[in-house]
Image (tube, rainbow, N blue to C red):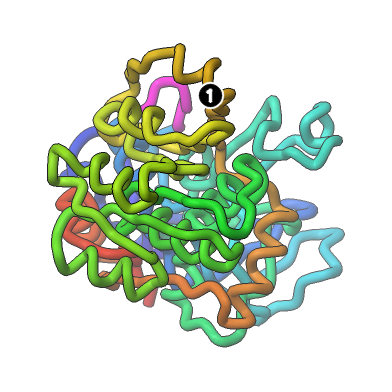
C-alpha cells in the first residue's frame, strides 16, 4: 500500500512517501479501513519531532483523524459491513482498568492514541478495534469528515464535560482560527454562550466572526486582554478555552470572573506558566486539564454534525504524497480550520 512513514524523528525530511508498504491485517475484533482522508493535528508535528514518553515505534505512520470505508472485518466483528463509511475514535483503551470501567477511556492506564503510539492514517489502509469506528455523518465529504473527530471531541470535552458551560456565559476562545478553536466557537454557540474569540490577523478575525463569535480580538496586540475585559463591560470571563499555553496563560487566569473555569488542552507556546494563586482561591477559580475525550462524547457530537449544527472547517487539502507540504502549511500557522491529506 501507499503510505507516508517516519523512519527517524526530526524535520519535514523525515516524512517519507512509499508505495510498497505491507498492508495491515485485521486481528479478531479489528476492522481494516480504506482511508480516504486524514486530517492533520499539531500532535503530528510533535510526534514527528519525537516525544520520548510516547515510545513511538519506528517505522511509524502518523495521523489520528481518519475517514474511510470498511475494507475487511476481523473475526468476531458483526456490527460493521464492508463498504460502510466510517470515522475514527482516535483512542485505543484496555477496557479493563478503573477508568475504562467508568467510561473514561481517555484516561485509560494503557491509553494509546492512533497516529501517536500506534500506526495512523497517513496510509491507504488502517487497522483499529471495531469499537473505534463510528458511522460517517452522511452530508460530509471525506475531507470534512476527517476534520471532525479529534478537534471537535477535544473541544466538546473541554466545554461541555469539564467546564460545564452554561447558556449566557462569557467564553473566551483563544486561537479561534485553529482546528480546535474553530470547533470551540461553534460548540460554545450551540450551547448558547456569548463568545469572544482571538485570532492573529484581520482575515482570520472575520472568519471567526462568521463562525458565530460575538466579538473577536487580535491576540497579536500586547494589550489584547484589555479589549476582552472591555467587551464584557468589566465583568470578566466565565470560561476560558485555552490551548496556547505559556504565552497567554497568566492573562487568561486574570480574566476569569468569580467562579470562572479555565480549560486547557495544549501548550504550543511552551509548557511553563506562572500566575498569582491569590486569584485562584479568592475568586474560587477552577483550572481543568483535558485529554481528548470519550467515545460516548464523540457519538453525541456526531449527531450535531450530521444535523448541520456543527460544521468542520477545512482550510486546505493535499495529496498523501505531499505530506511534507501539508506539514509545512501546518507549521506556518497560515490557515483557518484544518489541513487535510487526501488519500487517493
Residue appearing at x 71%, y 63% in the figure? 299
Q: Position of residue 34 (x, y in %)?
A: 54, 71
Q: From the image, which quarter does the N terminus lie in?
A: bottom left
In which quarter of the view is residue 20 placed?
Answer: bottom left
Assess whether residue 238 is covered by the magenta stretch: no
Residue situated furthest front in the rendering: 233
Q: Position of residue 68 (x, y in %)?
A: 54, 72
Tally of marks:
1
Magenta residues (range):
51-56
The reply to whether residue 54 is in sight is yes
Residue situated furthest bottom in the rendering: 139
Q: Dot 1 corresponds to which residue?
A: 283
In which quarter of the view is residue 181 placed?
Answer: bottom left
Assess whether residue 55 is covered by the magenta stretch: yes
Kindly state the secondary structure of the residue where label 1 is placed: loop
Q: Is residue 107 above or below residue 162?
A: above
Give the side of residue 269 with respect to residue 285, left or right: left
Residue appearing at x 56%, y 37% in the figure? 291
Q: Is residue 59 above or below residue 230?
A: above
Q: Position of residue 179 (x, y in %)?
A: 38, 58
Question: Which of the pair 336/62 is nearer the observer?
Answer: 336
Q: Position of residue 125 (x, y in %)?
A: 51, 63
Give the side of residue 222 with respect to residue 239, left or right: left
Amino acid at each position: 500500500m501507499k503510505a507516508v512513514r517516519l523512519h527517524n524523528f526530526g524535520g519535514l525530511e523525515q516524512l517519507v512517501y512509499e508505495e510498497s508498504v505491507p498492508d495491515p491485517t485485521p486481528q479478531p475484533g479489528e476492522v481494516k479501513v480504506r482511508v480516504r482522508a486524514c486530517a492533520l493535528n499539531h500532535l503530528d508535528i510533535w510526534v514527528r519531532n519525537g516525544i520520548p514518553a510516547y515510545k513511538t515505534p519506528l517505522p511509524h505512520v502518523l495521523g489520528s483523524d481518519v475517514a474511510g470505508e470498511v475494507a475487511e472485518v476481523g473475526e468476531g466483528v458483526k456490527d460493521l459491513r464492508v463498504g460502510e463509511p466510517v470515522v475514527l475514535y482516535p483512542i485505543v483503551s484496555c477496557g479493563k482498568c478503573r477508568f475504562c470501567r467508568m467510561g473514561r477511556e481517555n484516561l485509560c492506564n494503557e491509553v494509546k492514541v492512533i497516529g501517536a503510539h500506534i500506526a495512523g492514517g497517513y496510509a491507504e489502509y488502517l487497522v483499529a478495534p471495531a469499537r473505534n469506528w463510528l458511522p460517517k455523518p452522511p452530508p460530509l465529504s471525506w475531507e470534512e469528515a476527517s476534520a471532525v473527530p479529534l478537534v471537535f471531541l477535544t473541544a466538546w470535552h473541554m466545554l461541555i464535560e469539564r467546564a460545564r458551560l452554561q447558556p449566557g456565559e462569557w467564553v473566551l476562545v483563544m486561537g479561534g482560527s485553529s482546528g480546535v478553536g474553530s470547533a470551540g466557537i461553534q460548540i460554545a454557540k450551540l450551547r448558547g454562550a456569548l463568545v469572544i474569540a482571538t485570532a492573529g490577523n484581520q482575515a482570520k478575525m472575520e472568519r471567526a466572526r462568521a463562525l458565530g463569535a460575538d466579538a473577536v480580538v487580535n491576540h497579536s496586540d500586547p494589550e489584547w486582554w484589555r479589549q476582552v475585559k472591555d467587551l464584557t463591560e468589566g465583568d470578566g470571563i466565565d470560561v476560558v478555552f485555552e490551548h496556547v499555553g505559556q504565552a497567554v496563560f497568566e492573562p487568561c487566569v486574570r480574566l476569569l470572573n468569580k467562579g470562572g473555569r479555565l480549560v486547557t488542552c495544549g501548550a504550543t507556546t511552551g509548557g511553563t506558566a506562572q500566575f498569582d494563586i491569590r486569584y485562584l482561591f479568592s475568586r474560587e477559580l477552577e483550572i481543568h486539564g483535558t485529554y481528548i475525550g470519550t467515545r460516548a462524547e464523540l457519538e453525541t457530537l456526531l449527531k450535531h454534525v450530521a444535523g448541520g449544527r456543527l460544521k468542520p472547517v477545512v482550510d486546505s487539502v493535499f495529496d498523501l504524497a505531499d505530506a511534507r507540504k501539508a506539514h509545512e502549511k501546518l507549521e506556518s500557522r497560515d490557515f483557518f480550520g484544518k489541513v487535510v491529506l487526501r488519500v487517493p
